[in-house]
Amino acid sequence: MNWTSLESADQINNIKQQQGYSIIFKHSTRCSISMMVKKRFELDWNKLPENLTLYFLDLIKYRELSNQVAQDFYVHHESPQLLLIKDGECVLDLSHGEVSVEEAMSVLEA
């Protein structure tokens, strides 16, 4: 699997219009905890469905987009943070040590 860089408001609007699931991973490139959580997530992401789009948001570089994500999906800003989006709505919001493929899969398989 590969990350799709989230770099524009148009991409956020497209995510809100998509049918099915996608993931937004908000990451601070300055935070060692965020780095560790990202690596742990990537070790297991082969367990995710192949058709699932994984968006990567560098919130240091794109702070305004991070704020828009929080506003548009009605979540508090966290870092690291994983948002599972279904049909344009956030159905799972995980941060810090909660972020895992297993937690995402528990919703995807329900």
Image (cartoon, rainbow, N blue to C red):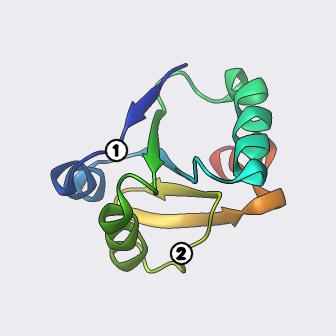
Q: In terms of sequence position, does the residue under pointer 2 or pointer 1 come before the other?
A: 1
Counting labels gives: 2
Residue 93, given in percent of the width and then of the height, sits at 62, 66
Say which mark, if any, is on residue 77. Answer: 2
For mark 2, give the secondary structure.
Answer: loop
Q: Nearer the viewer, residue 80 or 101?
A: 80
Q: Residue at x 44, y 80 (%)?
A: 74
Residue 82, given in percent of the width and then of the height, sits at 61, 55
Where does label 1 land, which residue? 6
Tell me which corner region of the image, top left, top right, bottom left or bottom right, holds residue 97.
bottom right
Query: In the image, 107: left or right of 1?
Result: right
Q: CA distance from mark 2 to mark 1?
A: 16 Å
Give the amino acid type for the residue marked by disc 2 in the picture: His
Residues tagged 2 and 1 counted as in contact (Cβ below 8 A): no
- Where is 18 relative to 76, above or below? above
Q: Residue at x 27, y 56 (%)?
A: 12
Tell me which corner region of the image, top left, top right, bottom left or bottom right, holds residue 63.
bottom left
For mark 1, give the secondary structure.
Answer: loop
Within 10 Å of disc 1 (Cα), the crowding (few <14, some 14-19, many 20+) is many
Give the amino acid type for the residue marked by disc 1 in the picture: Leu
Residue extending farthest left: 10
Residue 90, given in percent of the width and then of the height, sits at 48, 66
Residue 79, given in percent of the width and then of the height, sits at 63, 63
- Where is 98 relative to 20, above or below? below
